[in-house]
Amino acid sequence: MQLSEEQLSFFEEQGFLLVPDMFTKVEVDVLLKEMREVIKEDCPRRILEKNGSVRSFFAPNTTNEVFDKAARYKSLIAAAAKLLGGQIYLHQSKINSKAAMVGDWWEWHQDYTYWKKDDGMPEPNVLTAMIFLNDVTEFNGPMLVIPKSHLAGVVDDAENVAEIEESWYKEYVDSATYLTALTSDLKYTLKQKTIAKWVTKNGMCSARGKAGTVLFFHGNIFHASSNNLSPWDRHAYLLTYNRVDNQLPATDNPRPEFIAMRNFEPAITVETIV
C-alpha cells in the first residue's frame, strides 16, 4: 500500500498517523502466537514490571523469523521511508506487553531524547511504527499523544532520579545502567507544566484501532500511556526506523546492540510475514 498525500501531510503537521489494516488477522495471530513464546526467554532483552510481569522484550527480530519479517515488511518499510523522506534502517525493535489488569504505565516523554543523549543520534529524523497486536480501546491503556508537539523540538526538562524502595526490583534496575530508560520510572520525562502548556494549545488524543493497525509517530512527539486496568491485553510490536544519513556515531561505551542497533544498511524487504 502507498500512503496518500493527505496522510503524509497529516503526519508532518500532527506528528503521528494511524493506518488501519496494514497487517491481516492471520499475520497478527501469528505474531501473537510467536510473542507468547519469545517473551518466555529469561535474558537481558526481557524487561520486567515492578509486579514481575513482562514489560518489554527487545530485538525479537534477531532471534525470531516472524518478527524479523515483520520488521522488514515491504509496505511498512515503504511507508516509514516515505514519512521520513529518505532511506531507512532499523534502529530498535521491541514488544511492549500490557497484559490485562497488570500492564503498567509509561510516563510522558519524547523517545528522541534518549536516542540523542544516550546514543548520540544527530537529528530527530526518526519514527516508530507501532503494530497493534490486539484491539486498542479507551480501556486497555492506549497511547496518548499531543498533536503537533513534535514541533517543540527536544524539551530539556530536568532528569529524574527515581527513588525506589529496597526490593528485588531495585536490585534489578540497578543491575544495568540502561534500565532507567526502559522501566516505568523513566530517566527523561516531561513535567506537568510542559504537558499542560501543550495540551492547552493542541489538545490530547488516544491512539485506538483494531488489531493490525499501525501507529506511526515522530521521535519528538509527546506521548504516554496509563495502566491497563481492563480485562483485555494490549500488546504491540514497535519498530523504530532511522534515516541512513542520520546513523549513530562511533562511541567508546555504546548501549547494548539490542537497544540501539548499529547495522546501518537499509533493510532487505519481504513481501509477507507468513
Image (cartoon, rainbow, N blue to C red):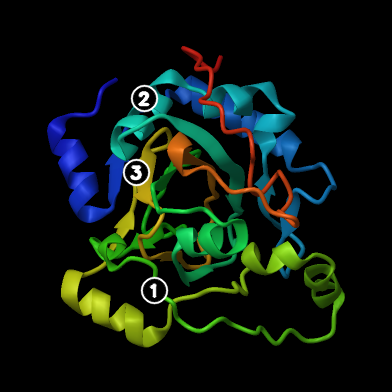
Which label belongs to residue 78?
2
SS at badge 1: loop
Q: Is residue 184 left or right of residue 198?
A: right
Q: Given the image, on which type of amino acid does mark 3 rest?
A: Gly
Q: Which residue lies at the image location 47% right of the left edge and 68% below the top edge?
A: 226
Q: Earlier in the sequence, mark 2 or mark 1?
A: 2
Question: Is 154 drawn above or below residue 218 in the view shown?
Answer: below
Q: CA distance from mark 1 to mark 3?
A: 29 Å
Residue receiving disc 1: 155
- Marks 2 and 1 sit apart, C-alpha to C-alpha, by 30 Å
Q: x, y percentage for residue 210?
A: 37, 39
Query: x, y percentage for residue 10?
Result: 18, 46
Mark 1 or 3: in front is 1
Q: Amino acid at mark 1?
A: Val
- Work out whether mark 2 precedes mark 3 in sequence or the reverse, and give the earlier one: 2
Q: Amino acid at mark 2?
A: Ala
Residue in view at x 56 percent, y 57 percent: 120
Marking on residue 209: 3
**Where's the C terminus, which quadrant?**
top right
Say which of 176 and 39 sits in front. 176
Image coordinates for residue 15, horizontal then vertical, percent? 28, 53
The residue at 68%/36% (across/down) is 60
* Figure check: 114 above or below 192: above
Can residue 131 be seen here? no
